[in-house]
Amino acid sequence: MRDRLKALYELQLIDDQLDELEALRGDLPNNVKELQLKLSQLESSVDAKQAEIDESAAKRALNEADMEKFLENQKKYKAQLYSVKNNKEYDALTKSIDQADEEIKKREMENAALLERELAMKADIESVAPQCDEIKEELKAKEADLKTIIKSSEREELKIREDRVRVEAKVKKADLSKYLHIRKAKGGKAVVTIDRKACTGCHYVIPPQRQLEIRRMDKLFTCESCGRFIVPTDVADEVKQ
């Protein structure tokens, strides 16, 4: 049981070191992620609008081609009016002329609406460009700062992570699972000791009988208040040494 407790406490000390290194980076990692996300969203929005502009332009081109065909048909129908032989033929031709005219107007209106939409989206894209440039500059600066901080502690962190792998291998799977759960729930601190008869995690006063049981190390104990693992002080001192 002593080795089991030592492994847990040693793992906690190593994670404390990693947490300290993470704290040195401050909000930079989160700031970088937020800027990356913001830039990605803006660029996705620009790409979507540009794709819609391209699609709209293609649709206008098709409408223009259709209008040319209808105009050609109109000219042909109008020329045929001079050679009609009866009212039935005349009515059929004038109807075809009117239909072609309606189709032309329909496409003209559609193209006008499409062009208006395109111009609005182009304006949106242009208005976003300075914002994207500003975010890129800020992101570049923060990424450089973060890289510098990471570089300064790279070797130290690598050594600590290697130690962590070694120590984690000594921790029982069930203990590790519970340790990680507590650590996540309690802000990183999953293993504590007793100081002045109280849990160093939440300062809950531990009854004398429970303190005695903890020192016996017959089994793993957790704080009745915060749920953290509790190790005897002598075990903690041994690990620290």
Image (spheres, rainbow, N blue to C red):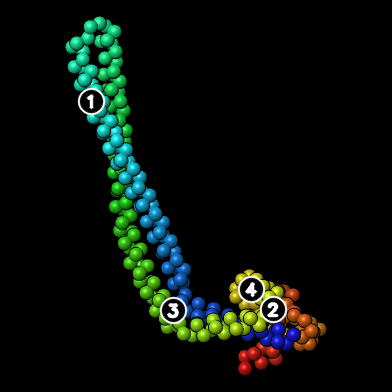
* Name of the residue lying farthest toward the bottom: 241
Tell me whether the residue at label 4 lies in contact with that at label 1, contact meaning CB atoms closer than 8 angstroms: no
Q: Quadrant of residue 201?
A: bottom right
Secondary element at tag 2: loop
Tell me which amino acid carries mark 3: Ile
| Chain-order first, disc 4 or disc 1 | 1
Q: CA distance from mark 4 to mark 3?
A: 24 Å
Residue 111 location, x and y as percent?
Answer: 29, 35
- Please tell me whether mark 2 or mark 3 is closer to you in this view: 2
- Viewer-proximal residue, 169 or 236? 169
Q: For the residues labelled 1 and 2, say whether their Cβ atoms are less than 8 Å apart.
A: no
Residue 55 in the image: x percent, y percent?
34, 43
Residue 211 can be seen, yes or no: no
- The mark nearer the N terminus, 4 or 3, is 3
Q: Secondary structure at mark 3?
A: helix
Identify the residue at image location x=27%, y=10%: 89
Q: Amino acid at mark 4?
A: Leu
Quarter of the N terminus within the rendering: bottom right
| Residue 47 seen in render | yes
The reply, left or right, for residue 68 in relation to residue 19 is: left
Closer to us: 17 or 97: 97
Residue at which label 4 appears: 180
**Closest to the observer, 201 or 95:** 95
User: Where is mark 1, residue-wise?
Assistant: 71
Q: Would you call the spot at circle 1 few (<14 residues within 10 Å), some (14-19), or many (20 or more)?
A: some
Label 2–label 4 contact, CB within 8 A: no
Q: Amino acid at mark 1?
A: Leu
- Which residue is drawn at the image coordinates 62% and 80% (left, top)? 168
